[in-house]
Image: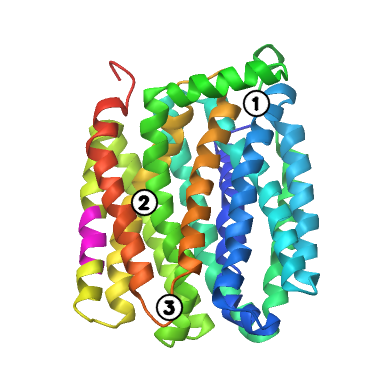
Amino acid sequence: MGPSLVVLLLSLMLGIQPITTDLYLPALPELTRGFGAAPGQAQLTLTSLLLAFGISQLGWGPLADRFGRRPVLLTGVALYTLASVGCALAGSLASLLVWRAVQGAAMGAAVMGARAIVRDLYEPQQGARTLSMALGGLGVIACVSAPLGGWVSDALGWRWALAVLAVFGAALFALLAARFTETLPPQRRAPLNAAALVRSWATILRNRRFQAASALAITSYAGLFTFLASSPFVFMQVLGLSGVQYGLALFSISAVYIVGTFICRRLLVRLGMRRAVMLAGAVTLLAVTSMALLALAGVRSVWAILVPFWLYMLAHGVHQPCGQAAAVAPFPHAAGAASALNGFLMMVVAFLMGAWLGQQAGGSVRPLVLGVWFWGSALALVAWTLIRRHGEAPGA
């Protein structure tokens, strides 16, 4: 596979996550009314997806290390397509939750596989730059997803917004079947052995670079998840935006994220990963503190949330490529397992945050703002301590 094809496939495999979350977010209030559910119950359609997504990677990772990336990817994407059809046809909220969990579990194969493929093909520094390009492609998918979801849900209803995911899954399956070439050679495949797998996980979890990189990826994603889980109700029900307007707000966030991935590639060349992340950590802290101060001062405006979050997403474009690439870098012979553990930890934290958000009273911007402030502050601390000490291999 040529470099352009690799980046395209990685973008689509990683992009399966934002399209699965972002495209249906503008439809979430309508879905809530359609099932007669409370906002906290409807948010379970997001948190159940992400919990299944995180747990499933613990299984997909070892399978990909044993049988190769291609069979795992094809199986996962086929299951994702089937689950997407089930979501669109769900007759109750309980049925939708089950299909969303299956969808999340299947999604884990694509995202875990993408991160493992980067380690198969590239050394750490080049891997971070390649992953940055792929995450830029992810940003393009996210840009399209939210406005498309807003338009489809306003024009045709929330079921059609979920049906679009089945089309995406089928197209990705066809492309992988036709163009993806296996990246894990037979001599680097690991046998399926429960005891060896537990030892491998223990080794990975004890690794200082893995701990630092995972903490960076977790805190950065947790802040984004807090925004995504809360913003449909805050922007549309509290601040009065339409579905299309909300979709455009998410479009702007994704566009800024793409700019952040471009900046990431330049900073990696000029500063190296450690200094790039520390600089972006300062931008994150400025963003979340500004948002929190405006909310505590009683400023009730879309712009008081959106503009600071643009800054957050600019830095997120640095943190995610660096965090995800660095987490698997020390483990060339267990990239699938390292990728799976990294993804699992990210999604467990997101699930717990979603459970907390579901218990908060509606009609206020404060759960969103204070949640983003907490994770942004934690991210800055990680960047200036753990990444500073363990972010790069000795001599990098």
**What label sits on residue 316 in the rendered view?**
2
Task: Identify whether 34 is placed above or below 56.
Answer: below
Is residue 396 on the magenta stretch? no
Left or right of residue 202: residue 77: right
Q: Is residue 125 above or below residue 249?
A: above
The residue lying toward the viewer, choosing from 183 and 95, is 95
Mark 1–mark 3 Cα distance, whole angstroms, equals 44 Å
Secondary structure under the numbered disc 1 in the rendered image: loop
Position of the N terminus by quadrant: top right
Quadrant of res 300: bottom left
Main SS of the magenta segment?
helix
Nearer the camera: disc 1 or disc 3: 3
Q: Position of residue 127 (x, y in %)?
A: 46, 31
The disc at residue 183 is 1
Q: Is residue 1 visible?
A: yes
The three-letter code of the residue at mark 3 reads: Val
Q: Position of residue 183 (x, y in %)?
A: 65, 26
Residue 45 to residue 276: above or below: below
Residue 373 relative to residue 24: left or right:
left
Residue at x 66%, y 22% (from the top left corner): 184
In this view of the protein, can residue 163 be seen by the observer?
no
Q: Which residues are magenta?
A: 285-291
**The C terminus lies in which quarter of the figure?**
top left
Q: Is residue 109 left or right of residue 276?
A: right
